[in-house]
Image (spheres, helix red, strand yellow):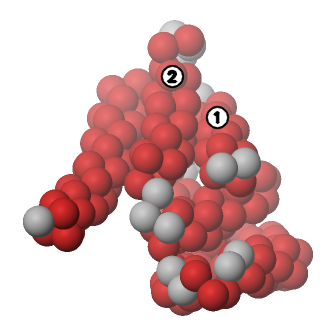
Amino acid sequence: MSYYKDFLNLPLQSLGVNLLRALLALSLVKVVVIYGGAAALASLSNYQNYIGILALIVTLSSQTGLTVLSSKKSLGSQPLLVSLKIVLLNTPLVIVIAWLNSKTIVLDNDLLNAKDYFLYSSIILIPFALNILLVAHQIAMQAYRNIFVNYLLVGIIPLAYFLFFDFFIISNLLLVMSIANWAGFLYLFFK
């Protein structure tokens, strides 16, 4: 009977974690639209897509392999260490790619310029990529509570920005999002 209980418990934990992440993302979108309007949402969405692409390159999209290999107890933390080394080795190349492409990513009537895209993508790239890998490792360990706290940190800190400031500047939000990713990374790193 315990097997079935455990079997049902893990998907429910995963559902809860992913639901939290989705609700926090939706809340951020709503608040950005309220405070910054459609242009702010377009700039934020463009930035997030850009960071997602850069993170795929810097991690070599290795999170699935990391999850599979980390779930094998005999390998210990070696898959995570290899993945972290990949990020650190690829980061300089990806920062050059970000610099070279920063002008092409700017939208018409964008609230961000090429310098902003390069600066904020450079600041967030390492913690964002490392967060992806550490979450993949935590999934392998079935440590959904750690992932839950990570998602809370990464999601709540940007929302808190709107509680403390009466004005909206997208570059400030991107800086706060970087801080949130560093907080989430440090939490998982020390777990």
- Alpha-carbon span between mark 1 and mark 2: 9 Å
Left or right of 93 in this view: 125: left
> If the image is split into quadrants, where does the N terminus sit?
bottom left
In front here: 94 or 155?
Answer: 155
Q: Residue at x 51, y 58 (%)?
A: 48
Q: Secondary structure at mark 1?
A: helix
Q: Secondary structure at mark 2?
A: helix
Task: Point out the tag, 1 or 2, that comes first from the N-terminus.
Answer: 2
| Residue type marked 1 | Val
Is 29 drawn above or below residue 70 in the view shown?
A: above
At which x and y percent is residue 173? 59, 34
Is 58 drawn above or below residue 187 in the view shown?
A: below
- Whether residue 100 is visible: no
Is 69 drawn above or below residue 39 in the view shown?
A: below
At which x and y percent is residue 137? 56, 70
Q: Residues within 10 Å of mark 2 (few under 14, many from 20)?
A: few
Q: Quadrant of residue 63?
A: bottom right
Left or right of 114 in this view: 142: left
Q: Residue at x 47, y 31 (%)?
A: 156
Question: What residue would you read off at disc 1?
Answer: 176
Question: What residue would you read off at disc 2?
Answer: 160
| Residue type marked 2 | Ala
Q: Residue at x 33, y 51 (%)?
A: 17
Is 63 drawn above or below residue 11 in the view shown?
A: below
At which x and y percent is residue 183? 67, 40
